[in-house]
Amino acid sequence: MKVLVVGSGGREHALVWKISQSAAGAKIYCAPGNAGIAEQAELVPIGADQIEKISEFAARAKVDLTVVGPELPLTLGIVDLFESRGLKIFGPDRAAARLEGSKVFAKELLAENGIPTAPFRVFEDEARARAYLEARPLPCVVKADGLAAGKGVMVCTSAAEAKAAVEQLMVQRVFGSAGETIIVEDFLEGEEASFMALVDGENYLPLASSQDHKRAFDGDRGPNTGGMGAYSPAPILSRDAEERVAKEILKPLMRGLTKRGIRYRGVLYIGLMVTADGPKVLEFNCRFGDPECQAVVMRLEDDLLSLFEATIAGRLDQARASWSDEAAACVVLCAGGYPGPFEKGKPIKGLEKLKGRDKVAVFHAGTAFAGGQWLTAGGRVLGVTARGASLSDALAEAYRAVAEIEWEGMHYRRDIGWRALK
Ligand code: AMP
Ligand code: GLY
C-alpha cells in the first residue's frame, strides 16, 4: 500500500510515524515533509498548497490513500480535486472545511442549531463594529472571518484595544481579505480543551481528549503561538463533559451540516471552553490539532490507517479506537524569537542520544539536515513527546529528553500540563 501525507510539521511527522508502525507495511510519501520525516517517508518536494501538483503526483505514483495535515489545502479543495480524479483521500471537502475557513459560517451554523457558543455579531462595516463595541462589556473578542495563520483572534481588555483590533483587521487589513468581515463576541470564562473526533458524515468516533498551551511563556503569558505543548488525556474533559460535547455539540452539528447538504468526512477538531455552564465552542478546525496530534497518536493502540479507511467508507459505526492507559505529553522546542521573527540554521545538538528510547518520540516540525548535522529551519522546531504511567511521569520523561537537546536560542515552556497537575 502507498500512502501520501500532505504537510510538513510535527503533526505530519506524528502521522507518518504512526502510519509507519501500521501492520499494512505501507510505502509512505510526504509532501513536502521535513528532514525528520525523511527518516520514515520519501519526501516529495511539492508545497502543501500546490493541490494540482499533489494530485498529479498521487495519480502518477499510484498512491492508494492521501492524508491531509494542514487546513490550507483542505480549504482550497484538495479533497474535491482528488475525488474528481477517483483518488482516495482523507479529509473534509471544500464545503465542509469552511467550518475552519470561515468563522462566520461556523458561528451561523452554531447559532442555527442551538449549539453553545459565545454570543456574537458579524460586521462588514467598520463604523458599525466600533459602535457595537462601545456598548459591550469587557473583555471582548474580535475575530477575522477568514484564515489568518492562527493570529486572527484578538482578546481585548479595553475599549481602546478593541477599536485598534477592528482598525487592524478592517482598515489596515493586516490579514488581507480574511478581515473583510469580522466577528465580535463575548469573552468566555473557563478552561480550554481540545476535542477531536473522526467524522464520516453520519457517525463519529471521539479521539482521546487533549489540551494545548497556546501562549508562548510559562503561566500562560505572552503572545499566542501555534501551540507550545500538549498532553492527553485532559482531565477537564470528564466523562460527563464528553457526554455533553456529544449531545449538545456534535450531534446537533452533524444534523445541521446534513440540513445544509454538507457531508463532513475527516477529523473534526472542536476548540472548547469548559465554562461553569458546560462546554462551549470557541472554534472548529477541519484537521488534527498540532501539537495535540503528537500527544494523542502516542496513545493510540489501533491502526491509524484502518481508522482513516473506515472514515472514508462511512463505516465509523463499526470502528473502535483503543487508547493506552498511559498519559502522553509533548513539549515543543522553539527557535529564538518565535512566535515573532525567528532565527534559522542553528545546529541542533543531542538528537542522536534520544534514539531508541522506548517511551519517547521526537517529532520534527522545522528542521533541516545538511553537512552531517541537524539544523533549525522553523519557528516550532521539535515536539518532544513521551508516554508515562501518569501525566507527571510522561512529563518527567519528556523533560528528561528535552534536557539532552540544545541549540543557540532554543526556548520552550517548562510548565506543560500545569492545569492538569494542580
Ligand atoms: P480561536 O482561533 O477562535 O480558537 O481563538 C484563539 C484563542 O483565543 C482561543 O484558543 C482562546 O484562547 C481565545 N478565545 C477565542 N474566543 C474566545 C472567547 N469567546 N472567549 C475567551 N477566549 C477566546
Ligand atoms: N494547537 C491548535 C491548533 O492546531 O489549531
Image (tube, helix red, strand yellow):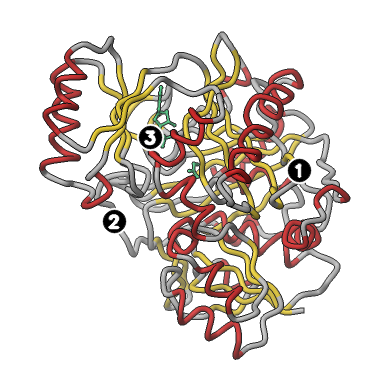
x, y (%) of residue 171?
A: 11, 41
Amino acid at dot 3? Ala
Query: How many numbered circles are shown?
Result: 3
Q: Nearer the viewer, residue 75 or 240?
A: 75
Q: Is residue 300 above or below residue 230?
A: below
- In terms of sequence position, does the residue under pointer 2 or pointer 1 come before the other? 1
| Residue 347 x %, y % | 40, 62
Q: Quadrant of the C terminus?
A: top right
Write the residue at 20% across / 19% down.
132
Mark 2 belongs to which amino acid?
Answer: Glu
Please give the residue where the numbered disc 1 appears in the rendered image: 205
Instruction: Find residue 51 and report its horizontal and vertical position in percent.
Output: 46, 74
Which of the numbered marks, if any, corresponds to residue 216? 3
Residue 34's place in the image compared with 236, above or below, is below
Distance (Cα) linking label 2 and label 1: 40 Å
**Which residue lies under the disc numbered 2?**
343
Sequence order check: which comes first, mark 3 or mark 2? 3
* Residue at 38 percent of width and 58 percent of height: 378
Q: Mark 3 to mark 1: distance in Å?
A: 32 Å
- Give the label, 2 or 1, closer to the camera: 1
169, 23: nearer the viewer? 169
Within-10-Å neighbours for mark 1: few <14, some 14–19, many 20+: some
